[in-house]
Image (cartoon, rainbow, N blue to C red):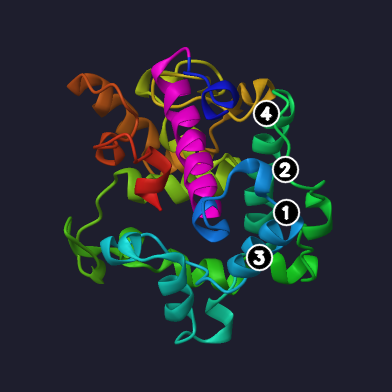
């Protein structure tokens, strides 16, 4: 099912995106297998899926990132969650529904091959509802937030390249410096901006712009994501044009070589984050 739903990408960038989806799908299904007791599909019931969803709301919101967490069983993760404050426990509605989506694909794949569970399974009955209001789901920065952020040593001066959080006299104009500024002035997605190539910045025309295109570093969200985005004059005042010209003069390919992934598990955007 995973091979059919997530076939190999046609390009390196496409494969990186598909590979992430493939790993996530496999992890969810293996987690479900652990929760349901590794039954034959013909033995699965609505109660098995309900039990799995009940487990998801008992897990830590963040888990699996440390080596110790990756070795823990579901039961051990739930036990760890019992020691955490309430606000740190329970997967979000989006995460629960995403996991159910992977189960839906599995059941559909099986049904197409005349393999059915012990009874009809209604996944829609288990979908989680996000009961937070829109403001609490994603609260925008206000002007005071942005002012505090702009005073961070990354922009006001840091100690050194390895001590970016400590105030000092050094301003390093790299991916960490330019990334949030580009996002703020363009509204672009993190990965599509951080994964750009230096040659995709056009400084020669009357209106300098970023040429957002699929490239070897990453694909794009959808076809309409391919676009030209004007570069705000403030970015040019801060030296973005000189930064790009210096990269090209040095023979650099990526716009932010300091964020280049060192493994298939990393992305340019995640390294900025």
Residue carrying label 4: 109
Q: Nearer the viewer, mark 4 or mark 1?
A: 1
As displayed, is residue 168 above or below residue 171? below
Answer left or right for 42 relative to 1.
Answer: right
Is residue 15 on the magenta stretch?
yes
Residue carrying label 1: 45
Answer left or right for 241 relative to 184.
Answer: left
Q: Which numbered disc, 1 or 3, marks the residue that appears first in the sequence?
A: 1
Q: Which numbered disc, 3 or 4, marks the residue that appears first in the sequence?
A: 3
Confirm or deny contact between disc 1 and disc 2 (CB under 8 A). yes
Is residue 175 on the magenta stretch?
no
Q: Where is residue 119 in the image (x, y as percent from the top left)?
A: 80, 48
Could you tell me how far apart the alpha carbons at marks 1 and 2 are, in whole angstroms? 7 Å
Q: In what quadrant of the picture does the N terminus appear? A: top right
Could you tell me how far apart the alpha carbons at marks 4 and 1 are, in whole angstroms? 17 Å
Confirm or deny contact between disc 3 and disc 4 (CB under 8 A). no
Quadrant of the image occupied by residue 265: top left
As displayed, is residue 161 above or below residue 239? below
As displayed, is residue 160 above or below residue 255? below
Q: What stretch is highlighted in magenta?
A: 10-32
Q: How many marks?
A: 4
Q: Nearer the viewer, mark 3 or mark 2?
A: 2
- Say whether residue 156 is visible: yes
Could you tell me how far apart the alpha carbons at marks 3 and 2 are, in whole angstroms? 16 Å
Residue carrying label 3: 51
Could you tell me how far apart the alpha carbons at marks 1 and 3 are, in whole angstroms? 10 Å
Tag on residue 117? 2
Q: Where is residue 120 in the image (x, y as percent from the top left)?
A: 82, 46
Could you tell me how far apart the alpha carbons at marks 3 and 4 are, in whole angstroms? 22 Å
Q: Which numbered disc, 3 or 2, marks the residue that appears first in the sequence?
A: 3
């Amino acid at each position: 099912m995973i091979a059919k739903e997530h076939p190999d990408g046609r390009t390196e960038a496409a494969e990186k995106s598909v590979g992430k989806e493939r790993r996530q799908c496999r992890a969810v299904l293996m987690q479900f297998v652990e929760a349901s007791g590794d039954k034959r599909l013909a033995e699965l019931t609505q109660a098995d899926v309900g039990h799995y969803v009940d487990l998801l709301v008992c897990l830590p919101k963040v888990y699996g990132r440390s080596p110790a967490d990756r070795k823990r069983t579901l039961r051990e993760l739930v036990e760890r969650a019992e020691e955490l404050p309430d606000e740190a426990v329970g997967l979000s509605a989006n995460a629960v529904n995403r996991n159910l989506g992977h189960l839906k694909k599995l059941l559909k794949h099986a049904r197409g091959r005349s393999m059915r569970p012990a009874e009809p399974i209604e996944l829609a009955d288990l979908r989680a509802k996000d009961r937070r209001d829109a403001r609490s789901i994603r609260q925008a920065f206000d002007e005071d937030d942005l002012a505090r952020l702009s005073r961070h040593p990354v922009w006001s001066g840091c100690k050194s390249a390895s001590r970016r959080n400590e105030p000092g006299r050094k301003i390093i104009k790299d991916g960490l410096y330019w990334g949030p500024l580009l996002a703020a002035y363009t509204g672009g997605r993190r990965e599509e901006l951080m994964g750009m190539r230096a040659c995709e910045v056009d400084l020669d025309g009357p209106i300098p712009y970023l040429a957002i295109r699929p490239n070897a570093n990453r694909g794009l969200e959808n076809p309409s994501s391919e676009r030209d985005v004007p570069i705000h004059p403030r970015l040019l005042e801060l030296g973005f044009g000189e930064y790009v010209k210096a990269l090209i003069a040095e023979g650099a390919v990526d716009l932010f070589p300091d964020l280049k992934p060192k493994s298939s598990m990393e992305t340019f955007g995640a390294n900025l984050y």
